[in-house]
Image (cartoon, grey):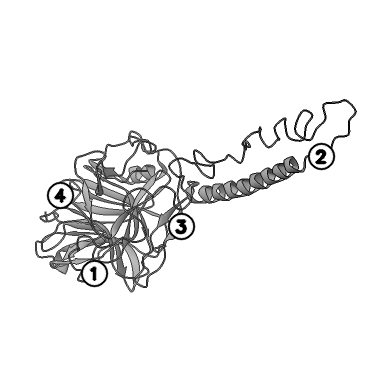
Amino acid sequence: MTDGTNPPSHPQPEPAPGSGGYGFPPGPPAQGEYGHPTAAGSYGYPQSGQPNPYQQQDAAGSYGYPPAHQGYPGGPGQSDIPGASQQPNWEAMADRSAAERRRKRLWMLGGGVTVLALLAGGGTFFLMGDGGDEGGQPDAQPTQSGSPEPGESSPAAYTATVAGDDTLLRDSYGKMGIRLGPDLKIGTLGKRFQVIGKGNGNSWGQSAEPVVDVTKSFTVTARVYNSAPKGSRIVMSQGDGESFSFELGVNEVNGKQAWIFRVQTGDKGAAATTRTVTAEGLGMVKTPTLLMATYDAEKKAIALYVDGKKAGETPVPPIWQAPGPLQLGRSKHHNIWTGPWQGALHNIKTYGMAFTEEQAAGYKEGKLDPSPKPTHAWLLT
């Protein structure tokens, strides 16, 4: 399908260095916050040097029992003579009562922190930034847990950024890091990673050089979560000159949002030289979605897949090779940045081949065998 029009342009300022994020601090969560373990303790257990509610030991006794000299034969106030009258040691009884109260308080405190830690880090949810234009709050979205896809790193060993630089996404298959703008932040929970955009002019990421060779067959794919109820929202594109080479994301079609894959075949970005495939009538907002777009240089056709199903295909002339690098969260239209991403992105990959319909379905189910090796990949889980 072809809509033949460019999306409405929303001029965006170039990113301002040092501007703030969106509720997610750069890097991993600070220790000791939001139910995460502290440096010396773990999920409600006491830190080193603090009493253990599960094994409380009094200063002079053992696990809540008084020492031998308090209230027991041979201690103060007690007679060593058999049959002599023995009086209760009120001080020892008071100590035992106080110790019991301390145990109960520590037990309740430890249990409460443990519950909070389990809720925060149980691995069944990961935060997706809403960050709406009206100042919405982040959403919690269920994830699909499971083993990494073939060829991916183990989540336990995976790191999202280059060592020593929390704003440069690590390329797991190539050497092309993606620099994050001020408002495209890394979100973490458990062992999962994603980037979260606020939907403003600073919600972008950019590689140093072009990533996709648009003169040859290619596939680009990402797992996305759009939290913007209207407007154009671009997952990824390539080019920073007058116009893009390709863009994948959200655009308004017939008054409603739709998933789109669009390529430019002329160097001026004119509507007459664009080709678009759309997927209309699907859940667009706050719905986890796997997007995949392909270009088959032999067939001279582009195709769009949504959650492993083919949404459409259209013939195209050769794609214009726009100058400039890969972009996350924005696209260039008539020399203006448009489509700032609002929501979350992860499992972003590029391939030097065009997936078939069967391969796209197999990729969605994690049953792609043999698994093609990506040319580049970021934010794997």
Q: Residues under labels 2 and 1: Cα distance?
A: 87 Å
Distance of label 3 from label 4 (alpha carbons): 32 Å
Q: Secondary structure at mark 2?
A: loop
**How far apart are the alpha carbons under marks 2 and 4?**
81 Å
Q: Neighbour class for label 1 at 10 Å: few (<14), some, many (≥20)?
A: some
Which quadrant holds residue 251?
bottom left
Sequence-wise, which precedes: disc 2 or disc 1? 1
In the rendered structure, are the residues bearing label 4 and label 1 in contact, judged by CB atoms less than 8 Å apart? no
Name the residue at 19% across, 63% down: 16
Give the residue pinned by disc 1: 7
Residues tagged 3 and 1 counted as in contact (Cβ below 8 A): no
Q: Amino acid at mark 2?
A: Pro
Q: Position of residue 59 (x, y in %)?
A: 61, 36
Split into 4 quadrants, where in the image is the N terminus? Answer: bottom left
- Which badge, 2 or 4, comes first in the chain's sequence? 2
Mark 4 = which residue?
208
How many neighbours does mark 3 have within 10 angstroms: few (below 14), some (14-19), or many (20 or more)?
Answer: some
Q: Depth check: 196 or 279 in front?
A: 196
Q: Nearer the viewer, mark 3 or mark 2?
A: 2
Neighbour tally class for label 2: few under 14, some 14-19, many 20 plus, Cα within 10 Å: few
Residue in the foreground of this view, choosing between 369 and 37: 37
Please say whether residue 355 is visible from this viewpoint: no
Secondary element at tag 4: loop
Give whichever of 372, 167 is nearer the camera: 167
- Foreground mark, 4 or 1, reads 4
Residue 256 located left or right of residue 42: left
